Image: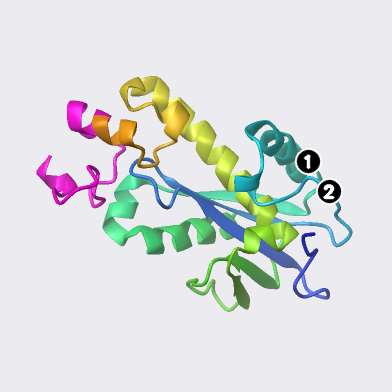
Amino acid sequence: MLLPYYNRDLVEAGCDEAGRGCLAGAVYAAAVILPADFENEWLNDSKQLTEHRRYALREVIEREAVAWAVGVVSPEEIDELNILRASFLAMHRALDGLSVRPQHLLIDGNRFMPYGDTPHTTVVKGDGKYMSIAAASILAKTYRDDYMNRLHEQYPVYAWDRNKGYPTKAHRAAIRQYGPSPYHRRTFNLLGDAQLSLDL
């Protein structure tokens, strides 16, 4: 059973990201402020849900949330910053997009780069513990999936419609055969062996 809040008396935003471990594409993050009385029996960590249920819940979250927003950091920015800092920046961009200012942030994971002077709490596996983080995980995941499906139409050889940029054997085999696309993260070990991606 997910918890409705960490601080009952504060306007609280949950934050999560998607795409951190991918070889290609942007990293996405979402921030969600849910009503204090929000209830949904299906709400859970996005990884525990079917694709159909994630998209159905996205509609519910967007309709019923007090505020929500999605932040994006490009592959070029990831290579420039490193993926950890890029993930924090994506969360900051999502928070920047909220129409309501949160008084407290609930962050999935164990690290975060402070967002101004807004207090935050990091929660390991928070997307399976708090409603607002679970909601953020669903938005981040579905919006990133939409983006990777669009990129797949341009570069079908990498099968991004199936692997969404994650390091599957087929994805790495396609990189080896066709070389990296403009959307691959050049600072990542694209081939999964000792050969660095920049040597391709």
| 138, above or below 151, in the image | below
Q: Quadrant of the C terminus?
A: top left
Is 71 on the left or on the right of 123, as rendered?
left
| 31, above or below 179, in the image | below
Q: Amino acid at mark 1?
A: Val
Tell me the residue that label 2 is attached to: 40
Tell me the residue that label 1 is attached to: 60
Residue at position x 54%, y 71% in the image:
115
Question: In this view of the protein, which residue sits in the foreground, 183 or 51?
Answer: 51
Magenta-highlighted residues? 174-200
Q: Amino acid at mark 2?
A: Asn
Q: Is residue 196 magenta?
A: yes
Residue at position x 46%, y 27% in the image:
161
Q: Are marks 1 and 2 in contact (CB under 8 Å)?
A: yes
Q: Quadrant of the N terminus?
A: bottom right
Residue 35: image x %, image y %?
83, 58
Dot in front, 1 or 2: 2
Mark 1 and mark 2 lie on one chain; the one further toward the N terminus is 2
